[in-house]
Image (tube, rainbow, N blue to C red):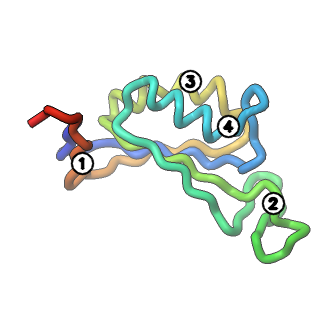
Amino acid sequence: MRIEEPAARLTVFIGEDDTWHHRPLYHEIVHRAHAAGLAGASVLRGIEGYGASSRIHTTRLLSLSEDLPVAVIIVDREDRIRAFLPQLGELVGEGLVILDPVEVIRYVGRTAPGDP
């Protein structure tokens, strides 16, 4: 897939310990994005943060290193991202979901063997 045009970035902020049917929630989001054919997704693990609970989670103190922040970032055309939003409504009970317009300068996926 090739994208070099205005696009959208979907960022989902959740906790590392959040689950969906006994699996990490970030794992489920990435797999659903892949199944939906979205251009790409990445999961970034935070080293410190807090959310609606106002409890700071950090890697610096062993006692507070549980449930670190995680950001799942997905980029694709805005219409494709918006079509994916209902799935997030089903998955994300607690967290923050944001949608930003972005300009993709260059995105070229790997080609399969034999492709030009």
Residue 86, given in percent of the width and then of the height, sits at: 54, 22
Q: Amino acid at mark 3?
A: Gln
Q: Which residue is mark 4?
A: 25
Question: Does 23 sit left or right of 62 as displayed?
Answer: left
Query: Disc 2 vs disc 4: which is toward the camera?
Result: 4
- Considering depth in this image, is 105 or 115 the residue closer to the camera? 115
Q: Amino acid at mark 2?
A: Ser
Question: Does 23 sit left or right of 38 as displayed?
Answer: right
Residue 55, given in percent of the width and then of the height, sits at: 83, 61
Query: Disc 2 vs disc 3: which is toward the camera?
Result: 3
Residue 54, numbered circle:
2
Crowding at dot 4, Cα within 10 Å, few <14 / some 14-19 / many 20+, comes out as many
Q: Which residue is mark 3?
A: 87
- Is tag 2's residue or tag 3's residue first in the polypeptide sequence? 2
Question: Does 13 sit left or right of 32 as displayed?
Answer: right
Q: What residue is shown at x 53% (from left), y 31% (from top)? A: 31
Most extreme residue toward the bottom is: 60
| Secondary element at image label 1 | strand
Q: What residue is shown at x 48% (from left), y 48% (from top)? A: 42
- Is tag 4's residue or tag 1's residue first in the polypeptide sequence? 4
- Considering depth in this image, is 75 or 62 the residue closer to the camera? 62
- Is tag 2's residue or tag 4's residue first in the polypeptide sequence? 4
Crowding at dot 1, Cα within 10 Å, few <14 / some 14-19 / many 20+, comes out as some
Position above or below: 34 against 3? above
Q: Which residue is mark 1?
A: 107
Q: Kindly check if marks 4 and 1 are in contact, taking CB atoms under 8 A apart as contact.
A: no
Residue 24, given in percent of the width and then of the height, sits at: 70, 39
